[in-house]
Amino acid sequence: MGDLGFDTLAALAAISLLAGFVDAIAGGGGLLTVPALILAGLDPAQAIATNKVQGSVAAASATWTFWRKGMIDWKSAWRFTLMAFLSGIAGALCVRFLPRAVLDLLIPVLLIVIAIYFALSRKLQDADAAARMTALTFGLTAPVAIGFYDGIFGPGAGSFYMLAFVTLHGYGVVRATAHTKLLNFASNFGSLLLYAATGAVVWPLGLVMAGASLIGAQLGSRMALRFGVRIIRPLLVAVSSLMALRLLLDPANPWRRALATLF
């Protein structure tokens, strides 16, 4: 932190504000902030850990706005939240044991599937639909799997939560966004607690970015409430596509290396 100049801090704050805005609507802000932190001089472990500070604050800020508007069903949401929180801790515990190549192969494919689904689906609407599984089954699957991934890595978790709420739990787009932010906060915060205990978090930098992301999250959540599916749908498609492209362009990604051998 002491080696970072004012210009670098200002740039990181600006990126965090944008990330908070995007996260509140479609998720994926981590793919803006994590590379920025690495470019600022943090090692990957510190970058992921420090990013959890601004990610937690942004998600909490957006959750607060949606809650005040009555968009969160706490009767079932508290169970989902608990599962996401515990899974985020479990993911952070296992971060050193899961081969990163597995995530590098799987995540871009899933993001492309999400982008295609939200781009082509004619069923997306602000109103709720019939759930495809019970609340118990949903709570024991989606928050567990996505929360675990959020604890290990994170970027794209919001898009995965969103897809789960819309396709499996039958929530309309705005309500799904509200509950996505709640679970995103839970898994982010759970993993943050563990990363903090290991000393991986650069707190001064994380708090500067958190302040900026809080403002961005407020702007984004208010936009989502005002425009609903009209802004959430295109932004989800764009963010998921750009996240997949960003990951695939990484020279270390196995997909890029495989394509290079073919051509």
Image (cartoon, rainbow, N blue to C red):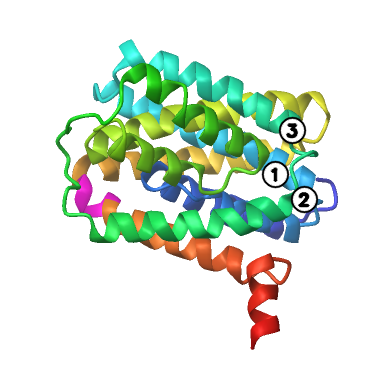
Rate crowding at label 3 as few (under 14), some (14 to 19) or many (20 or more) other CA atoms within 10 Å: some
Q: Which residue in the protein does label 2 denote?
A: 44
Q: Label 3: which residue?
A: 94
Tell us which disc is closer to us: 2 or 3: 3
* Alpha-carbon span between mark 1 and mark 3: 14 Å
SS type, badge 3: loop
Label located before the other in sequence (2 or 3): 2
Q: Is residue 218 visible?
A: no
Verify CB contact (< 8 Å) between mark 2 and mark 3: no
**Dot in front, 1 or 3:** 3
Q: Disc 1 versus disc 2: distance between alpha carbons? A: 6 Å
Comparing 101 with 76, the one in front is: 101
Label 1 sits on residue: 48
Image quarter of residue 166? top left
Say which amino acid is labelled 1: Ile
Dominant SS type (magenta): helix
Q: Is residue 159 visible?
A: yes
Compared to residue 58, the image places residue 159 above or below, namely below
Magenta highlight range:
228-232
Residue ID at (50%, 59%): 109
